[in-house]
């Protein structure tokens, strides 16, 4: 059970159904040594469910044309720059991770990106079709994936990050926009 739920994001209803099923199974066990094993399992399940709830608040999964984009974010306290300086402004820093999976039978290439970061104090936009990501325009072959991490700053929270990737099917040359997000940017405190 734990391996099934810790490897993916679950909906609130799926979490509820897992808790109910687990509780019913626990209630059917006779008191004795098995009782303690079930308590241990239940405690582990509660921990994983808590992690799932936290993950679901900072994760987005989109699919289109056999391509899936998984976006996750994490709030970073006391962020430091490349030279070790402490960032003071803006006050909220986030790492975000993007994983692009190719489930199709064709190779695709990421050509460009578009990002919109919004909070109640304004927005920052990376223009549509800005070249590649992190200096790359990766080819993603069937059954493979490409991932990268980056960082953004927000003047207030909560914020939202959304956008798209310009992808090209390398077999037929067809371009398409692969949507990303929306992804909530919050401190989770």
Image: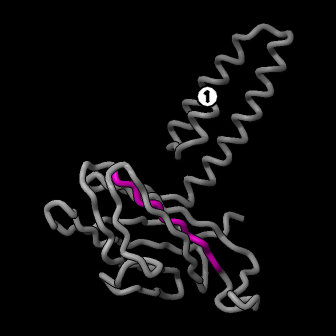
Q: Is residue 145 left or right of 33 when viewed as pictured?
A: left
Q: Position of residue 34 (x, y in %)?
A: 80, 13
Identify the residue at image location x=72%, y=81%. Answer: 79
Which residue is found at the position 46% from the left and 58% from the top? 70
Image-based side of 16 in relation to 116, left or right: right
Residue 19 versus residue 89 in the image, above or below: above
Q: Residues within 10 Å of mark 1 (few under 14, many from 20)?
A: few
Is residue 98 shown in magenta? yes
The colouring scheme, among rainbow, by chain, secondary structure or one colour, is one colour
| In the image, residue 111 above or below residue 178 | below
User: Residue at the location (48% across, 64% down)?
Assistant: 147
Residue 5 occupies quadrant? top right
For numbered disc 1, what is the local secondary structure? loop
- Residue at 69% from the left image edge and 11% from the top image edge: 28
Secondary structure that dominates the magenta span: strand
Please give the residue where the numbered disc 1 appears in the rendered image.
1
Q: Position of residue 167 (x, y in %)?
A: 28, 68
Rendering quarter of residue 175 = bottom left
- Residue 44: image quadrant is top right
* Residue 27 sits inside the magenta stretch: no
Quarter placement of the C terminus: bottom right
Q: Which residues are magenta?
A: 93-102
Q: Is residue 152 above or below residue 30?
A: below
Q: Position of residue 124 (x, y in %)?
A: 46, 87
How many numbered discs, if any?
1
Return the x and y of residue 128 as percentages of the image width and height: 31, 83
Q: Give 99 or 15, whichever is nearer the viewer.
A: 99
């Amino acid at each position: 059970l734990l391996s099934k739920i810790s490897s993916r994001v679950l909906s609130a209803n799926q979490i509820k159904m897992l808790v109910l099923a687990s509780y019913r199974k626990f209630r059917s066990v006779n008191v004795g040594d098995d009782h303690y094993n079930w308590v241990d399992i239940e405690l582990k399940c509660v921990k994983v469910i808590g992690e799932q709830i936290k993950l679901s608040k900072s994760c987005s999964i989109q699919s289109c044309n056999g391509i899936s984009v998984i976006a996750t974010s994490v709030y970073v306290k006391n962020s430091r720059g490349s030279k070790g300086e402490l960032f003071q402004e803006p006050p909220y820093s986030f790492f975000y991770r993007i994983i692009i999976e190719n489930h199709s039978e064709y190779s695709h290439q990421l050509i460009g990106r578009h990002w919109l970061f919004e909070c109640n104090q304004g927005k920052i936009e990376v223009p549509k079709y800005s070249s590649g990501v992190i200096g790359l325009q990766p080819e993603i072959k069937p059954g493979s994936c490409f991932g990268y991490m980056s960082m953004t700053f927000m003047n207030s929270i909560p914020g939202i990050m959304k956008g798209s990737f310009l992808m090209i099917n390398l077999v037929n040359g067809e371009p398409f926009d692969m949507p990303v997000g929306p992804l909530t940017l919050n401190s989770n405190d």
